[in-house]
Amino acid sequence: MSGLVKVRLAEEADRLPMALLFAAVAEERDGIAAEPPVDVERWAARWELDRTFVAVTAGEVVGVIVVIESAFGFGEIAMFVAARCRGRGVGTALVERAIAWAKARGLHKLTLSVFPHNEAAIGLYRKFGFVEEGRHPKHMRRATGELWDLIDMGLLL
Ligand SMILES: CC(C)(COP(=O)(O)OP(=O)(O)OC[C@H]1O[C@@H](n2cnc3c(N)ncnc32)[C@H](O)[C@@H]1OP(=O)(O)O)[C@@H](O)C(=O)NCCC(=O)NCCS
């Protein structure tokens, strides 16, 4: 699939598709922190388009990565891929683009947070050299009331 997927900077017209995809991934209650209900209109409005990249196939947004830039030289990434398109290189293409953007931007480091059970995400990040930098026990309270650990990972650029 990666050959058919194009990664490009997000545009105005992507706002709603990105928010709808975000809401669909939140419905899984598994990989990303957000859980339903997702305020789609609010999310559509809040993407910073100049640091958000989309993976597009057949004219449809199937993946998103955002780099949240700090004032201290590092950026934090957050990402998600449509469930039906996972395991086919979309996430890899998105992380590649985020790293290239961060380097060009002069950032010295990328960071992220991930749930310990998220083997796909951790495998993806490790592939690029991200290492675990810390773990927050029982950090995130889920809608069920469960308390999930959160792992911090970082990559020096
Ligand atoms: C995590 C996520 C973005 C990965 O995207 P993807 O398009 O499936 O990733 P890729 O196909 O490029 O896979 C990249 C690497 O991830 C790892 N990986 C992918 N799926 C995996 C799985 N099920 N188990 C273990 N490792 C896996 C592999 O190392 C793989 O590299 P390889 O194919 O060279 O072996 C995607 O699963 C997703 O959106 N999940 C839900 C949202 C989420 O968890 N976001 C991240 C929050 S921190």
Image (spheres, rainbow, N blue to C red):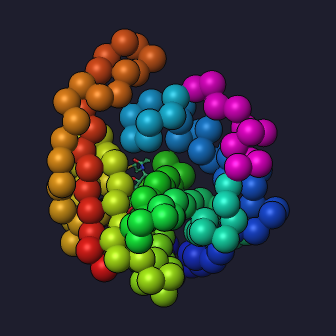
Q: Nearer the viewer, residue 134 or 63?
A: 134
Residue drawn 74% across the image and 39% down it = 42
Horizontal and vertical percent position of residue 125: 29, 63
Q: State the residue in front, 57 or 25.
A: 25
Image quadrant assignment for residue 151: top left
Q: On the rendered structure, is 123 left or right of 111?
A: left
Ligand 1 is found in which quarter of the picture? bottom left
Left or right: 39, with 90 as reference point: right
Most common secondary structure along the magenta stretch: helix
Against 92, is 118 above or below?
above
Quarter containing the C terminus: bottom left
Magenta stretch contains residue 148: no
The count of marks equals: 0
Residue at x-position 59% and y-position 45%: 22
Res. 5 in view? yes
Rendered residue at 51%/60% (across/down): 68
What residue range appears in magenta?
36-46
Q: Nearer the viewer, residue 56 or 72?
A: 72
Which of the pair 20/101 is nearer the observer? 101
Which quadrant would residue 109 be assigned to in this image?
bottom left
